[in-house]
Amino acid sequence: MALTDSDYLRQLQALLPPGPAWPKDDNALLTRLLSGLSEELARVDGRAWQIAEEADPRTVAELFADWERVAGLPDACAVVFGGTQTVAKRRAALVGRLATLGGQSPAYFIALAASIGYAITITEFRAHTVEDDVNYALYDSAWNFAWQVNAALNTINEITVDMTVEDPLAAWGNALLECVINRLKPAQTTVLYSYT
């Protein structure tokens, strides 16, 4: 927490040697001089605390554009979403880009979709073998590298308390889901989308 000018004034007065040549009463000329110095010290201290906040992408304000540039944002998925996003969504994308480790499991992609507001399930395919049931579909070995995302036909993203008055009350569509999944899927795989 930043120190106030009165905190700095008390500290500066405590550094003075004892004696009548160094008065500490409020109307003394030396106290007024130290008061002016303490205001500047408090301003610099407060600014230092603000700079510390700028070093964390979860609390950044002034350097938000620089953090986005370093993280490669906004990316193509932000453009698909409509070009402009809320500050809360931009911040979530920034923190996600910097903190996400990635993954290949269905659980990872289900959690990823949930983080951007979509409820999905994933169907994995595998090649048919002689040990499979007769009702199992006849897939060849290429299907080992395909998987399917199952989602609602029109997912609705509604406004939250983190959004501003300039944001729409709701947005429909699955373009953002497809963009994010296609960007993060393993390169050797093919993703199919099934909307119900």
Image (tube, grey):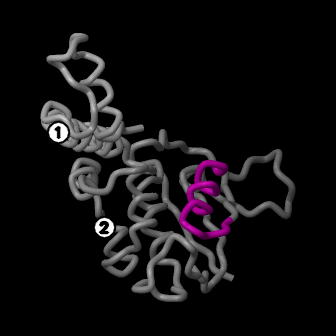
Please state the horizontal and vertical placement of residue 184, each as a whole percent of the image. 44, 53
Question: Quick one: 14 or 177, which is closer to the camera?
Answer: 14
Q: Is residue 101 magenta?
A: no
Amino acid type, mark 1: Arg
Residue 98 numbered mark, or none? none
Magenta segment range? 106-120
Name the residue rendered at 55%, 44% in the picture: 104
Q: Quadrant of residue 160?
A: bottom right
10 Å crowding of disc 1: few (<14), some (14-19), many (20+) = some
Residue under numbered circle 2: 76
Where's the C terminus, which quadrant? bottom right
Q: Is residue 6 above or below residue 76?
A: above
10 Å crowding of disc 2: few (<14), some (14-19), many (20+) = some
Residue under numbered circle 1: 32
Q: Is residue 21 left or right of residue 12?
A: left
Name the residue rendered at 61%, 66% in the picture: 149
Instruction: State the SS at label 2.
Output: helix
Amino acid type, mark 2: Ala
Question: Quick one: 150 or 77, which is closer to the camera?
Answer: 77
Please state the horizontal and vertical placement of residue 6, each as a whole percent of the image. 33, 38
Question: Quick one: 187 or 137, which is closer to the camera?
Answer: 187
Please state the horizontal and vertical placement of residue 40, each as a whole percent of the image. 17, 41
